[in-house]
Image: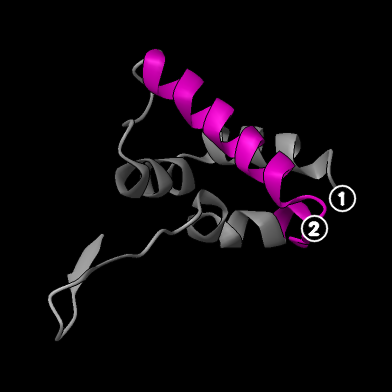
């Protein structure tokens, strides 16, 4: 997302994917730390990428988050993958 401030400079706001899946992290019993943040990102990216390539969910993160949370099977799969970090 880009935001223009009063001096017309572009400020880039970057949201990491794990924040969008915070609810699933809690269900998996995983607390994000500086040590495991990269691994969390990797697991989520890999899972969404695979599911999107199979046509099970969107490659758009906002849509994918809702689709995964709304699909019990996908939710369980991702939670199991994340539990390896707990």
Left or right of 5, for residue 12: right
Vertical relation: 45 (above or below) 16: above
Is 14 included in the stretch rendered in magenta? Answer: no
Looking at the picture, how far across and down is residue 66, in whole percent? Answer: 37, 49
Q: Residue at the spot x=72%, y=34% of the render?
A: 81
Q: x, y percentage for residue 54? A: 40, 13
Query: For the residue labelled by badge 1, is the local secondary structure a helix, a strand or a loop?
Result: loop
- Dot 1 and dot 2 residues touching (CB under 8 Å): yes
User: Where in the figure is residue 84, as x and y percent of width and height?
Assistant: 84, 38
Furthest residue toward top: 54
For this view, does 65 lie left or right of residue 26?
left
What SS does tag 2 mark?
A: loop
Mark 2: few, some, or many residues within 10 Å (few <14, many ≥20)? Answer: some
Q: Is residue 12 above or below residue 52?
A: below
Q: Which mark is residue 29?
A: 2
- Which portion, as a residue range, is magenta? 27-53
To which quarter of the image does residue 10 belong?
bottom left
On residue 86, the disc is 1
Q: Main secondary structure of the magenta part?
A: helix
């Amino acid at each position: 997302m880009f935001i223009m401030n009063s001096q017309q400079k572009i400020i880039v706001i970057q949201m990491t994917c794990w924040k969008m899946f915070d609810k699933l992290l809690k269900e998996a019993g995983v607390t994000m730390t500086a040590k495991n943040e990269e691994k969390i990102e990797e697991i989520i990216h890999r899972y969404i990428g695979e599911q999107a390539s199979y046509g099970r969910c969107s490659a758009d993160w906002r849509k994918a988050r809702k689709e995964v949370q709304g699909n019990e099977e996908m939710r369980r799969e991702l939670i199991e993958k994340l539990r390896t970090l707990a």
